[in-house]
Image (spheres, rainbow, N blue to C red):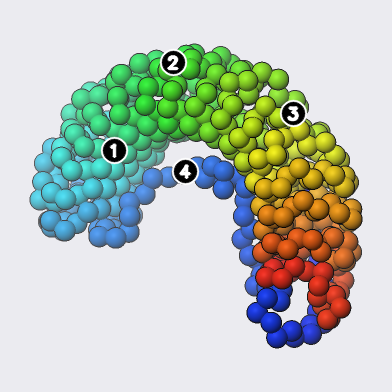
């Protein structure tokens, strides 16, 4: 990745009275689109909506102040970061329409969660403070009952919660990240038959072999030491999103025909095995960023691929792109690319998004964009371009956003003769 450089832009503008003329953006620190997040914007934390919320966060409360919160209109309560240790059975019975309760960062042991609530939809119990119970990682019996709870977030949990189906019979989404879990039960979806989204990031799970995931649609296993991993298509018929970032494992064949989105970032991949994608023929979104690819992997079997991120690898030359022509979005940010072949992008007639920032490009070849008739977004930031002419933008008639910050351009002369270099209706982001 190149270092950012201070660039002095001397901008000479001739005002062209046309609403179709290019625009110059002077707004600094514009947030650029990150394709990895476009593909899979992982929800790190569950929160309560700020509408109709009672906020009692960080008040050093030892008990829940029921005298302050008695209303049929209250839908959410935040008691995050207090000193509460017990949640009595009927503590919220005067708040019948409560839908979200945030009890994160208190001192609540699982055995002391006694409350019952028929309408609660979201319960947050993340990162309880120092536990006095030494029997961690043992099965527990939760006395509370939440018959309509849909989302449970209990990060940094130190007990085995995956056997307490009576408390959460209709759970859809479960967040158990950062809990040092070493395994999960292979009958997890029998215990929780409505489970759709499972977040198990940052644990110690080392094997997951042909589990029955029934109705599960999203599975997040990032940052686990998975040495044994396999899927049976009979048990993954609904699985659409799978995240396996940094699992320190040689990725096996993923026999998941239903898969739409896959994250394999940060796995030190050089070349994926030819059969990894043998059974993922409907895959549309693939993240291969932060690996060790020196050239494009062969992904021609993925005929439905639409979004691909190869950001932060060590690709130097873009010549043969072995990817289906269905591609709409491509990120090559943060590689070491110094050369792009004239014909590299010829077949990608549907490409709308191209990120070439943080590379070593000094120019682009004439005609490189010949068939990019749909391109709307082009990021060329943090390269070595000395002038805008070297970007060869003339044929990009549909371009709407162009980012050129941190190049070696010392002046930008947009007089009448040069303004045609930049496509009409395009905004150029300088800073």
* Label 1 secondary element: loop
Q: Say few, some or many: other residues with alpha carbon within 10 Å of mark 1 (under 14 / 14 to 19 / 20 or more).
A: many
Q: Say few, some or many: other residues with alpha carbon within 10 Å of mark 3 (under 14 / 14 to 19 / 20 or more).
A: some
Of badges 4 and 2, nearer the viewer stands 2
Taking 82 as reference, is 252 above or below it?
A: above
Q: Say few, some or many: other residues with alpha carbon within 10 Å of mark 4 (under 14 / 14 to 19 / 20 or more).
A: few
Residue at 40%, 33% (x, y): give it: 197
* Residue corresponding to mark 3: 298
Residue at 79%, 61% (x, y): give it: 395
Asked whether the residues under the numbered discs 4 and 2 touch, taking CB atoms below 8 Å apart as contact, a structural biologist would say no
Q: Earlier in the sequence, mark 4 or mark 2?
A: 4
Label placed on residue 98:
none
Left or right of 224 in this view: 5: right
Of badges 1 and 2, nearer the viewer stands 2
Quote the CA–CA distance across marks 2 and 3.
27 Å
Taking 241 as reference, is 58 above or below it?
A: below
Q: Earlier in the sequence, mark 1 or mark 2?
A: 1
Residue 312 versus residue 6: which sits nearer the camera? Answer: 312
- Which of the 4 quarters of the picture holds residue 20? bottom right
Left or right of 408 in this view: 49: left
Residue 181 versus residue 419: which sits nearer the camera? Answer: 419
């Amino acid at each position: 990745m190149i270092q950012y450089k201070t660039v002095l832009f001397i901008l000479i503008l001739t005002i062209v009275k046309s609403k179709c003329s290019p625009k110059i953006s002077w707004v600094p620190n514009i947030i650029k689109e990150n394709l990895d997040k476009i593909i899979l914007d992982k929800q790190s934390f569950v929160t309560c909506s700020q509408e109709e919320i009672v906020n009692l966060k960080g008040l050093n409360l030892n008990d829940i102040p029921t005298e302050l919160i008695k209303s049929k209109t209250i839908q959410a309560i935040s008691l995050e970061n207090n000193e509460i240790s017990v949640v009595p059975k009927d503590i919220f019975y005067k708040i019948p329409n409560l839908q979200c309760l945030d009890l994160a960062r208190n001192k609540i042991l699982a055995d002391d969660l006694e409350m019952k609530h028929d309408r609660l939809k979201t319960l947050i119990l993340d990162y309880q403070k120092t536990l006095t119970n030494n029997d961690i990682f043992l099965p527990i019996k939760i006395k509370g009952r939440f018959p309509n709870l849909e989302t449970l977030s209990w990060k940094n949990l130190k007990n085995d919660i995956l056997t307490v189906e009576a408390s959460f019979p209709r759970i859809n989404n479960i967040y158990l990240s950062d809990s040092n879990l070493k395994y999960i039960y292979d009958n997890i979806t029998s215990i929780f038959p409505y489970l759709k989204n499972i977040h198990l990031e940052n644990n110690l799970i080392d094997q997951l072999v042909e589990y029955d995931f029934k109705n599960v649609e999203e599975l997040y296993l990032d940052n686990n030491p998975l040495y044994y991993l396999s899927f049976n298509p009979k048990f993954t018929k609904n699985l659409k999103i799978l995240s396996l970032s940094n699992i320190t494992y040689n990725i096996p064949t993923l026999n998941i025909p239903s898969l739409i989105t896959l994250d394999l970032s940060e796995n030190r991949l050089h070349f994926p095995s030819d059969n990894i994608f043998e059974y993922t023929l409907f895959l549309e979104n693939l993240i291969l960023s932060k690996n060790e690819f020196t050239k494009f992997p062969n992904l021609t079997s993925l005929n439905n691929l639409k979004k691909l991120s190869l950001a932060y690898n060590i690709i130097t030359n873009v010549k043969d792109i072995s990817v289906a022509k269905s591609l709409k979005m491509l990120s090559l940010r943060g590689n070491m690319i110094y050369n792009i072949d004239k014909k590299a992008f010829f077949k990608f007639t549907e490409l709308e998004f191209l990120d070439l920032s943080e590379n070593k490009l000094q120019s682009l070849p004439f005609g490189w964009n010949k068939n990019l008739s749909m391109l709307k977004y082009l990021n060329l930031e943090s390269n070595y371009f000395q002038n805008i002419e070297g970007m060869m933008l003339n044929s990009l008639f549909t371009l709407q956003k162009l980012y050129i910050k941190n190049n070696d351009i010392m002046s930008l002369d947009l007089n009448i003769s040069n303004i045609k270099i930049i496509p009409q209706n395009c905004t150029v982001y300088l800073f």
